[in-house]
Every structure is written in structure tokens, then in C-alpha cells.
Amino acid sequence: MKKIIWSFLSFIAILIFTGCAVDNLGTAEKSVPLKLYRMPVKNIQLKGNNINFYVKNGSLIKNNRKIFDENGDIIYAFKIDNKIYYVLKCNNNLYEIKNLNNKKIVKKLMGNSVRVFTDDNNRAVIALRFSNNNSYVYDNIYLFNNKGLTLINKNLNLGTPYYRVDNMFIFFPVTQNDETTYNYAPFNVLTGKFIDPKCLYSTKWLGIPVSSYNLIGVAGNNLIYSYDGSKGILLLAINGETGRIYTLLSYKKTKNLLIFFKSGKTIVLKILNNPKLEGESSLAPENLKSRTKYAKLPGKYIDLNTLEEYRSIDSSFTPITVPEYYTSITGKRLPHAYYSYSLNTINMTELNQLIF
């Protein structure tokens, strides 16, 4: 019952924050740019940013070394201007933000619950809830950067902790009556608003509004998604803060194979030069690790975090597999992995989760 209520509230919130109406089905087409975005070209190699620290079981693990704090459990860690900070949960509803280098207290917060969201722009959003009633509404929303802690919002509903979180985005599942998730409503914690990659509903099937976009993943502040409309299949990016939309690729103009790469939080799209290559895939793979043979072939490299083109990428980047599932003749649900893929393949794939 709770899930149904949350799905309904998410749906209503989408309509409120985006201004889109379900029966206004033409609005999705109007704001998609016709021309491809001409991105800056950097004739250098893009360096990866592998993250060498994470939090586990109350400790911070950096370069395979466990770091503890005797005053409590470390529950979050993030980097600002190449300095690592962590959030410590102490007794009596006390939280402390500390600098890892000297373990000095940067800020103390009093509350019942804390959540932290970070991006690649030397910022962290810290949400603080005062009550202990397990509400999903957080009272104070702070921005933490090299200038300190600033209150930027109040009383934001951040959903359950089980919703996917990526950078500054929370993905609220959008469901139908049978509670099957068929897409996600991305919520930007920094702005306190839902992000709508092109009005969500631009067509109807049996009278039901159906999403015409396929959310692919998050790269920095950009949501990457494919969109199938009257202009054909497009690969688009929408900036979560400004709302600006960038058309990155058109299937009408480019049918070359694609491969996504990842290093830390940096996501790269490679467009292979050879238009005659065939896509690589595997039915029922033993795992989803990429087995592409095209990773080192010539191509164009686009940093999806910054929307800039690079000459090449360094060895820290690894190719990303596009997962899908199919039903065998025995009725068993089996994985299907794409290792190199066209834009059409990505758009047609029924993704059960974001690729990156």
C-alpha cells in the first residue's frame, strides 16, 4: 500500500514541478533541439578519476587501509577541492563533519537522521531531519563546499533510502496499476525539483500515457537518455540544474556502434569510426563484464560529464555492458548482454536499471 501511495505522489509531483500535463502530448517535441550540439574539442587524452576511498561498516577505507574515528561511526565520505571529508555519527543525535587529513571538526549538526549527496563540482548536499518518526521529509538542506555550510532549502521529500541515488539525483520509480516500474522520475536534491526528460508522456497506448524516453544514466550533473519521437531516435543530455537540453547524437545521421566507458564518476561515450562493424552481444552470459573487441579501435570520445570531445582516454576507463533480460522457451528469465551497441539498440532495450 505504501508503495502505491508513493508512486501516486511521485506522479503528482512530476506534474507539479515540470508543468507537463498528461493530455498535452505535443510538449515533448517542442523543446528537443533539432541541431546536434557542437561540443568543444580537446586534442588531449582524458584522464580518469578512480575513487580510492569509500565507507564500510563505520570505517573509511582509503587505499585499502581502514580508518576509524573513536568518537563514532563514519557514515559518509566525500572530496572537496582534493580534501576528503567524512560525516561522523556520534551519540545523542550529534553528527560531525570532519577533515580526514587532521580529523578536525568542520561543523557540528544536531538531528535524528542525515543524508549526503555529492557531485563532481566540489560540492556536497547534506540533508538533516530533526524528528524521529521515520518521515522521508528532511527539514534542512545544506550546501557544503570550500566556503562552508549554507542552508539552501527546507522540507524536501527525499523518498525512501531504497531509491537509487546518483550524484545529486534521486530516482523515484514511476509505476502503473500493477506496480511494475516502467521508468523513473529524477529528482535533483540541489534544486529541490523533479527533472523531466521531455515531459515523460508523449504518446498513448490503449489510452495509457506511455513514456517515450529511455533513461540511460547519470554523468556529473547531466542525465543521459534516448528519445524516440518525430525527429527519430536521439541521444540527449539534460543538465539537472539549468534544465538545458543537448542533442548529442541522431540515429538518422549516425548508425555507428557505441561503447560507454567509466572511470570513477566520469562517463565517456565512444562512437566507433568504422560504420560496418556489427554489434557484440551474448545470451545468458556468466557475468555482465564487457567482452568487447572494439575498445581500442579508432573512434570519437565524448566526456558526458562535461560534454567535451577528447582525442583518447587513459587505461583507467573500462567499457560498460548494457544489460537486458529475455525469456527462454522454458519460461526462464535469462540475462542478455550487449558489449557494443547502436543507439537504436539502446533505445529499444527494456532497461530494468540505469546503465551508469
Image (spheres, rainbow, N blue to C red):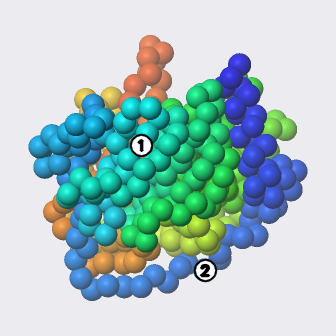
Residue 170, x across and y down, in percent: 55, 46
The CA distance from mark 1 to mark 2 is: 49 Å
Dot placed on the residue nearer the N-terminal end, 1 or 2? 2
**Which image quadrant is residue 233 in?**
bottom right
**Which image quadrant is residue 134 in?**
top right
Number of residues whose C-alpha sits closer than 10 Å to that of mark 2, classed few (under 14), some (14–19) or many (20 or more): few
* Image: 171 above or below 248: above
- The residue nearer to you, when weighing 163 against 261, is 163
Q: Which residue is situated farthest in the front direction here? A: 92
Q: Please state if 209 lies on the left or on the right of 194 as rendered.
A: right
Q: Residue at x 42, y 43 (%)?
A: 95
Residue 1, x across and y down, in percent: 71, 19
Circle 2 SS class = loop
* Image: 346 above or below 283: below
Under mark 2, the amino acid is Lys
Residue 229, x across and y down, in percent: 69, 60
Q: Which mark is residue 95?
A: 1
Mark 1 or 2, closer to the camera: 1
- The residue nearer to you, when weighing 329 against 219, is 219
Q: Residue at x 34, y 33 (%)?
A: 283
- The residue nearer to you, when weighing 21 against 129, is 129
Q: Residue at x 75, y 55 (%)?
A: 17
Under mark 1, the amino acid is Tyr
Q: Which residue bears the numbered disc 2?
A: 35
Circle 1 SS class = strand
Residue 40, x across and y down, in percent: 42, 85
Q: Residue at x 20, y 57 (%)?
A: 102
